[in-house]
Image (spheres, rainbow, N blue to C red):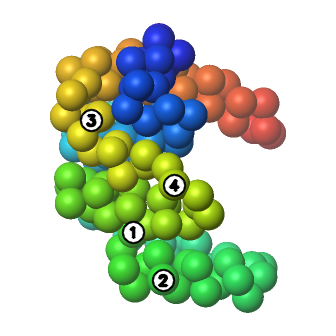
Amino acid sequence: MVVKLRKCLHPRLGKFSGVALDVLFDHVLCIRWENYEETSQADWIGLTYDLLAARSPDMSEKRKFILANMIKHNWMQMYSTTEGITTILHQMSRRIPFENPLEQGVVAFEEHKNAIISTFDEFFPEIISVTQAKLDTFAP
């Protein structure tokens, strides 16, 4: 299902279709949050930032710098809006030292919105199930 979707995005995004799809799936999770989580998105993001900050003594200086910027600019919340994913894809494209189509990710989302959302809705519960099964192997 995801492979088929990547093929749909390939004409616009080329070999970056998988990278863009990861960002687009994060966006879908944000806009459909209530379908998957009882805790409000804002509360969950705040909790996650707090957990990461508590682990900062174990992080390298580079990771601490990234975490500080993540919290300061509320990167996780950016995935909730089209403007936010536009910014994220733009910043990602600038880090790549050659011309690339990542900034077209939002256009691809609009072109294939229904397919992206339906694939996410089919795929995400599988991710949750597999992740839970893996976590259960670590349970005492």
Q: As drawn, is 38 to the left or to the right of 91?
A: left
Q: Quadrant of the C terminus?
A: top right
Give the number of the disc on residue 109: 3
69 relative to 18, above or below = below
| Amino acid, disc 1 | Trp
Q: Are marks 3 and 1 in contact (CB under 8 Å)?
A: no
* Among the 4 quarters of the image, the one containing residue 63: bottom right
Whichever of labels 2 and 3 marks the residue nearer the N terminus, that label is 2
Give the Cα separation between the discs numbered 2 and 3: 27 Å
Q: Are marks 1 and 2 in contact (CB under 8 Å)?
A: yes
| Amino acid, disc 2 | Asn
Give the Cα separation between the discs numbered 4 and 1: 24 Å
Whichever of labels 1 and 2 marks the residue nearer the N terminus, that label is 2
Residue picked out by circle 4 = 99
Whichever of labels 4 and 1 marks the residue nearer the N terminus, that label is 1
Residue picked out by circle 2 = 69
Give the Cα separation between the discs numbered 3 and 4: 20 Å
Whichever of labels 4 and 2 marks the residue nearer the N terminus, that label is 2
SS for dot 2: helix
Whichever of labels 3 and 1 marks the residue nearer the N terminus, that label is 1
| Amino acid, disc 4 | Glu
* Disc 4 crowd, CA 10 A, few/some/many (<14, 14-19, 20+): few
Mark nearer the viewer, 3 or 4: 4
Nearest the viewer among 9 and 54 is 9
* Disc 3 crowd, CA 10 A, few/some/many (<14, 14-19, 20+): many
Residue drawn at x 27%, y 44% as measured from the top left? 106
Residue picked out by circle 1 = 75
The spot of residue 4 in percent (x, y) is: 47, 12
